[in-house]
Image (spheres, helix red, strand yellow):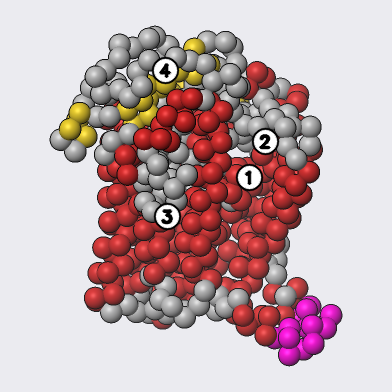
Amino acid sequence: MINICHTFWSCQSVMEDHVSYNSITLYADTCEGSNTNTEINESKNELTPNLKAQTGKTWGRDRDISYITVLFSTLILTCCPLLVYVFWVSCTHYQCSLYEPIYRLQISGFSKEAFYSVVLRKLPRFTWDGIKIYISWLSFQAILYAILPAKIGYGQRTPAGHILPYKVNGLLAWFITHTLFLVGAFYFNWWKGSIIHDNWGALLIAANIYGYFLTFFSFAKAYIMPSHPEDRKFSGSFIYDLLMGIEMNPRFGKYWDFKLFHNGRPGIIAWTLINLSFAAAQYNQIGYVTNSMILLNFLHAVYVLDFFYNEDWYLRTIDIAHDHFGFYLAWGDTVWLPWMYTVQSHYLVRNTVDLSIPYFLLVLTTGLSGYYIFRAVNHQKDIVRRMDGNCKIWGKPAQFIRTHFVTSDGKEHNSILLTSGFWGISRHFNYVGDLLISLAMCLTCGFDHLLPYFYIIYMFILLIHRIYRDDARCRGKYGKYWDNYCQVVKWKLFPECTRI
């Protein structure tokens, strides 16, 4: 459900737990299994039990890249920030119409004066208030991350063989943040409930400043003071390494993890806070909050609270277990996620949408159905992993393939690829749930404009791309085990549509 262009380059699959909430989408993937170092007795439900290790390849992010990849990396670095500004201008000044500014430029002959009046004059302005608000927000989240009581969770084994600890306290931080925001706005009147909406343009500039700073700081840190040098990947291309990152798990000290903090705090906690502020702005403008805005807030809240409730599970997902920390996560978590994933709430402030009761119930059912599928699919994977395959799926003994893989330190490890239940239908059936939830969020905006449907279009492209990336990655990690798995589970996403 998720992260930027961040998501364009991440891979997801069946046995890896990714909740893309990035996306963030919540994604569970195939490639990652258990962290056990010991051999496990074979089960009667295992498929091809006599297949023996080795894959013969080093798994992880690719080291060798092409000139085409560098070109696309350059386009992402330049076009993604521009797209955020295009959407901001369209929503703030043209009621979220992508056509209106183009039409105005067209009737003016695309002159320099028209471009200045239609586009440049409409861009957000830098303000010190925006900087102060953003620094206060970021600092507050950093303090909560550091001092709140936390469970210690553990991520997946890295290609170099590390299993890293993480402070898991996001749910408590979410409740403290939202309680303080609501009490401060509506009881003590310390700030307006619409403060985020009212400073949305200035905050966009402030977030971009921090996102770019974090990108270059992380790039330099990878050379000067890397947290785990053996897990770094250098491609030989400055552009690609800047985009995709060099360090896998950059940290301050033992627990301060760049990935977990920036995705969860300035990224996902902000998601529902932004929605609340835009709902307050809508109330200020029309005197009530539409049922479409209420439904959108509810759907997003379900998604976000599920992320933090299962934050420990997120540690074994693609963002943490595979992706390195570069522009796509540093800038993506601080800019792309908060601004592009909340575009529906911006739309509903600019365009009043009152849903009929039948349509409201249809959208609600679509969203909750998607959430059920997403959660049920990943529950099956979690149960099989925890029970080491000694459990039932849909009333029958779980079917799976036990695999072996080798980390770069030369050690052999075991994993499981589930082949029954939802995971027997397709390798990424959890994505069906993601897509239904994403569609429901967009449907709250009605059908007058295309812009609010950017999210479902983006998510569909993202997930299809991830499916193909995941296939290449898992093939490199598991070798003949993955080939056997693909023979058993033939469909990638939708049966009859995405056969390998």
Ranked by sequence position, the earlier of labels 2 and 1 is 2
Badge 1 density bin: few <14, some 14–19, many ≥20, Cα 10 Å: many
Q: Quadrant of residue 258?
A: top right
Q: Is residue 254 left or right of residue 50?
A: right
Q: What stretch is highlighted in magenta?
A: 104-117
Ranked by sequence position, the earlier of labels 2 and 3 is 2
Asked if disc 2 and disc 1 are in contact, CB closer than 8 Å, the reply is: yes
Q: Distance between the residues labelled 2 and 4?
A: 35 Å
State the predominant SS element of the stretch in magenta. helix
Ranked by sequence position, the earlier of labels 3 and 4 is 4
Indicate the amino acid at tag 2: Gly
The secondary element bearing badge 1 is classed as: helix
Q: Which residue is tagged 4?
A: 51
Residue ID at (34%, 79%): 354
Q: Does the magenta stretch include residue 28?
A: no
Badge 3 density bin: few <14, some 14–19, many ≥20, Cα 10 Å: few
Indicate the amino acid at tag 3: Cys
Which of label 1 and label 4 is nearer to you?
4
Ranked by sequence position, the earlier of labels 1 and 4 is 4
Ranked by sequence position, the earlier of labels 3 and 1 is 1
The secondary element bearing badge 3 is classed as: loop
Q: Which residue is tagged 1?
A: 328
| Residue 107 appears in the rendering | yes
Q: Is residue 167 left or right of residue 134?
A: left
Disc sitting over residue 497 in the figure: 3
Asked if disc 2 and disc 4 are in contact, CB closer than 8 Å, the reply is: no
Residue ID at (40%, 76%): 446
Q: Nearer the viewer, residue 62 or 459?
A: 62
Q: Distance between the residues labelled 3 and 1?
A: 30 Å
The secondary element bearing badge 2 is classed as: loop
Indicate the amino acid at tag 1: Tyr
